[in-house]
Image (cartoon, helix red, strand yellow):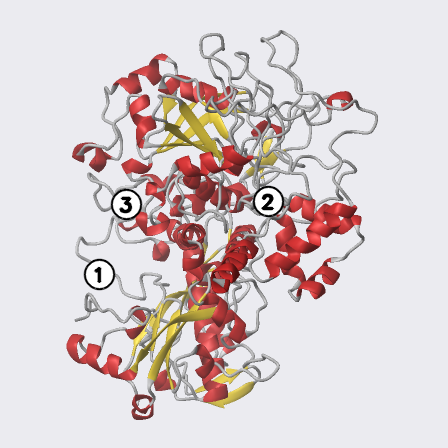
Amino acid sequence: MSELFNAVDALIASRSPLPAPPERKRLRHAHGLTLDEVAGALQVRRATVSGWESGRTEPRPPEREAYARLLAGLAQLYPADTTTPGDPTPVPEKPTPPETSAPPAVPAPPAVPTPPETSAPPAVPAPPAVPASPAVPASPAVPASPAVPASPAVPARPIVPGPSAAQPPHASASTASTASAASAPQATPVSKQSAPRPARAAASAPAPASAAAPPPPMSPPQPSSPPRRPVAKKSAPRRGTASAGADPRFGNGPLAVVDTEADGQTVAYCTGGLVLDVPARSLPALVEWTLQEAGLGAPKLHASGKDADPLLVLTESALQRYGLPVTLSPSERLAGRLTDGHKALAQLDRAEWRLTRRGLGPWARIYRPARGHQRQCVQLCVPSWGALDQRTWGEAAQLPPARLAWLLGTYATRVMTPRGSAAVTGLELMTALNPPTRASAPDETGRRHKEHRPGSLGEDAVTCAPCEAPDGHPLLAGLPRFHQRGPAEMLCEEAYDWARELTDPECMQRYLVGIDVNLAFGAAANGAVVGLATPPAHVTNPEFDPARPGAWLVDLSHVDLSRVLVGKQWRQLRGELLPSPFTPTGERPTGPAWYATPTVAYAVELGYDVAPLEAWVRPDQGKYLNPWYERLRNAYVDTMRDLGVPDKLPPGEFLAAMDGHKQRDPHTAIVLDAIKSTVKGGIGKLRERAHGGGWKPGQAWPALARPTWRPDIRAAVISRARVNMHRKMVALAAATGRYPVAVLSDCAVYAADGPSPLDVLPYDTDDRTVPGSFRLGVSPGMVKHEGTQTTLWAEEVREKYGENLNLARYIKTGQVTVADDGE
């Protein structure tokens, strides 16, 4: 029996109640403790405690029980104030009928938590917002404020938005709602006969100082009467901020998942756990409600940019509620939109709402022409129509509404509000962070005008160079129909796809170990100097300038990888065991070919002279992609931290943390995959090819009209990624004599005596490795373990599928489904 009691005690300790993240920070400050002191007492890292206080992470056993004990003790010494000094003791108020005067102030709605250490704690703590990952119930010693306002004029329900120890991440929306309702104060129910029609839940506008104190919680309903959703006033409530420093216009977050419940009530699940009642009975009314009352959207990412339009995600029940089909017909699916004449389209037309050329499809934009500087646009996402591609979003389309709102809201907060596929969002993020125009200085009349913003791509599309144009481009319309362009006519900067046979010593080693570069294309975009808003200029017999972006026709066949400069020393290598850095296939070039600037600059770095025959260079240049990389890097690192893999871990600890990291929280893992797809897809979208029926080679396609259709920028990024990979392989070969067996994009495979990357990469006792080579870690450009197979496996699959099989393609799982194209 004692074993059972011990197991129960351990289970209770694993769920030790903690106060909300802002209260944790307040208690530490009240006692004058530093992060280092708390971290030392709990035997954790300083960043770990900071993550607990910001709500980014939650403590786990055994540290959780000790941390809860610390906070409970501090809470007894420094209890939270619940009233403003001088104010009378709060008394629950009764619901009042709608009045013409402004409604009383209510607390702001919960929102995704802001980064830690943004400001000093207030003198009187405000009710804590619901974090992105839900906290367990507050300790009895620390009075917990209501998660959502309890005013009868605000019909809100707290929904648990993220995974916790008390509730699995895949819990249903109804379960989350019930669990939250059981612990949060409930408003007194109002009868349907006498109550106005529900409008929405929101926060009020900032109130005067006398009304700054939060309203008291309402009395809970009687046990014999089941709790029902409070009813709001019929007039539109004022909006307020969701958290300190948030934009008051978008107090309820960037998006909402609209769902119709079994009782016929339509609700909108927002980020932060808030649920809004939706009174709209038609699609046009839903758009109007979103823009006028819902408080949805996101502020611009750049001072010269635009605010993000609110996004509504429609579940299957919501589609039925608004007269839309649950699934598209085969013809509609092929066209990617509803057919003309649908009654929903007629409703929008009568209400003077417009659709973009994409029509009403999986991702739709409904708008009216802007009035002055105010946009009127709402974006729709329909998962059951295929909006959330399974290759990017996994099972997100099947999640309950509350979980889907949390997942998409986390992505929107860290990256941006989705604008379509991950590739489309990645491209839109470039423009959002680097807008093409800005407001000019006032003219003689005091008016400002729109002007080009330096460092951007501008508003107009730029014609590419002939060598940069893909097949079928209008610039190539004069070529013979079946003409195949060679390297001397076409710029071909692509990722690696190279493999070779194992040497006899490598066959004697037991394992093949794959290492994969984190966010390789993102790391390559960092610091890349690319052309901006001016067309390329053609020059003949130019002198190569590594600082000038462009395309160069040059012969690099004389570069011998058997003797190269590594650092400042000439080194002898086995060049036949290395792929060529100048071709995607790894084969040595045989004559002049077009290369992007980073490729030619690498030939110079290896110690060889170059003599270009001609070039297309970009006179206007800059590091256009730097803000894009920085935001996506932060999103990636923050999400990896949520999965239990913080940065700056020693190599062994990093490999241990990476083991099974996606299984710790499958929904956060979906966010991680979406971020990676945003990076890769955004770079690929820079050279979007023609698609759809009716297009013929030589005709322009819609993507060519975009300022962000820039095959030269894509070529520069891919060139840098391939060169970075080769540089690290050369450094490792020069220091250890290890050579790659296969390379596929950002994955390299090495033979080793052990199954771990530590058996490939040499680390000393100070966790230092070969300078300029691969390093284990979570940051973009560092590497992780991709997979390990045996050399016997390699012999078997190559015997079955052929010697040209790229082992890097299958090193992760060992499952070979289709032979390479060359077979």
Callout 3: SS: loop
Circle 2 is placed at which residue position?
454
Residue 623 appears in the figure: no
Q: Is residue 94 left or right of residue 294?
A: right
Circle 1 is placed at which residue position?
484
Circle 3 is placed at which residue position?
690
Q: Are marks 1 and 2 in contact (CB under 8 Å)?
A: no
- Which amino acid type is marked by label 1? Gln
Q: Residue at x 73, y 51 (%)?
A: 73
Label 1 Cα crowd, 10 Å radius (few <14 / some 14-19 / many 20+): few
Residue positioned most to the right: 86
Callout 2: SS: loop
Q: Residue at x 42, y 59 (%)?
A: 662
Q: Is residue 693 above or below residue 317?
A: below
Give the number of the mark in front: 3 or 2. 3
Give the mark, 3 or 2, whose residue is nearer the N terminus.
Answer: 2
Q: In 3D space, how far apart are the residues under numbered discs 3 and 2 (Cα atoms)?
A: 30 Å
- Which amino acid type is marked by label 3? Ala
Q: Is residue 430 left or right of residue 752?
A: right
